[in-house]
Image (spheres, rainbow, N blue to C red):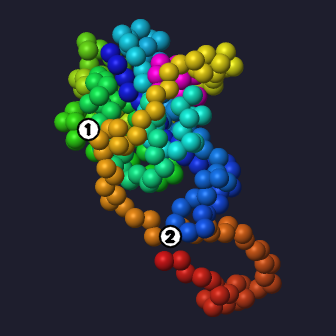
Amino acid sequence: MKILVTLKSVPDPDQPIAINAEGNGLDHAATTFIINPFDAIAVEQAVRMREDGQEVDEIIVLSIGGMECEKNLRTALAMGADRALWVKDVGRFDPWNVSRVVHKVVDAEQPDMVIMGKQAVDDDSNQVGQFLAAQLSWPQATFASGVEVSAGRLVVQREVDQGIERLAVSVPVVMTCDLRLNEPRYTALPAIMKAKRKPLDRTSLKELGIEAEPRVEVLGIEATSSKRECVQLEHVDELISRLRDEAKVIT
């Protein structure tokens, strides 16, 4: 079985970010990127399936983006993936166009399963997996919090409002991972050094025969301040007056 895992590089939420001069995106020169946490769970799941005795012949990790992708692809290789594919492009990709790129890679690589995070923490779109499954006409199992392999099928647990839902799906399949599925491993130094010798192939939209069709346009981004000023008041009447006359209503 061949598994394709998608991986997105997202701004590190623990680091300050800066907006570019145009005011419509981030200043990548001042931004630290990490593997999208949900995608790290997807990589871990693919590696665990092999370690649990499933017949996984190859695990490929795929990323789309600029120079920030290379380090994170190497990290995924150190976690246990066999090969990386980097679609090198610095343009903006909405979920529809990401799914089109992944579709092309699926056509070329012919994996039996595509595993991805349920969403990216920078835009929280939660759409790529569903778009991809529809384009491929494959079954989908989204928000997986537990996975079992039985008789050539996946039995996926999903947390829903009513409790735990169990789905049985056959391969090929698109599966998206929730936080409770697993905890990604830390990569040791020997694995990091070994990952440097694993293949990392580079391609482009032109080589894949795709022209981006933007569906979403970012008009502007602005940074908000979380600074707060505390004021001690003497009387309830003063509090009521300030709430009535000075408090700002956020709509």
Q: What is the quadrant of residue 112 in the picture?
A: top left
Image mark for residue 205:
none
**Pointer 2 local density, CA inside 10 Å: few below 14, some 14–19, many at least 20:** few
Q: What is the quadrant of residue 178 in the picture?
A: top left
Q: Is residue 14 above or below residue 200?
A: below
**In the image, farthest residue toward the left:** 137
Tell me, yes or no, if residue 120 can be seen here.
Answer: no
Q: Look at the numbered disc 1 and give the secondary structure of its residue.
A: helix
Distance of label 1 from label 2 (alpha carbons): 31 Å
Amino acid found under the numbered disc labelled 2? Gly
Q: Residue at x 54, y 23 (%)?
A: 77
The stretch drawn in magenta includes residue 206: no
Image mark for residue 220:
2
Look at the image and tell me in which quarter the N terminus lies.
top left
Which residue is at the front of the view, 99 or 239?
A: 99
Q: Is residue 22 above or below residue 44?
A: below
Which residue is at the front of the view, 86 or 12?
A: 86
Residues rendered magenta in the picture: 75-84
Tell me, yes or no, if residue 20 can be seen here.
Answer: yes
Percent across and percent down for residue 157 are: 35, 30
Percent across and percent down for residue 110 are: 28, 24
Q: Which residue is mark 1?
A: 133
Mark 1 or 2, nearer chain start: 1
Q: Look at the numbered disc 2 and give the secondary structure of its residue.
A: loop
Q: Residue at x 30, y 45 (%)?
A: 210
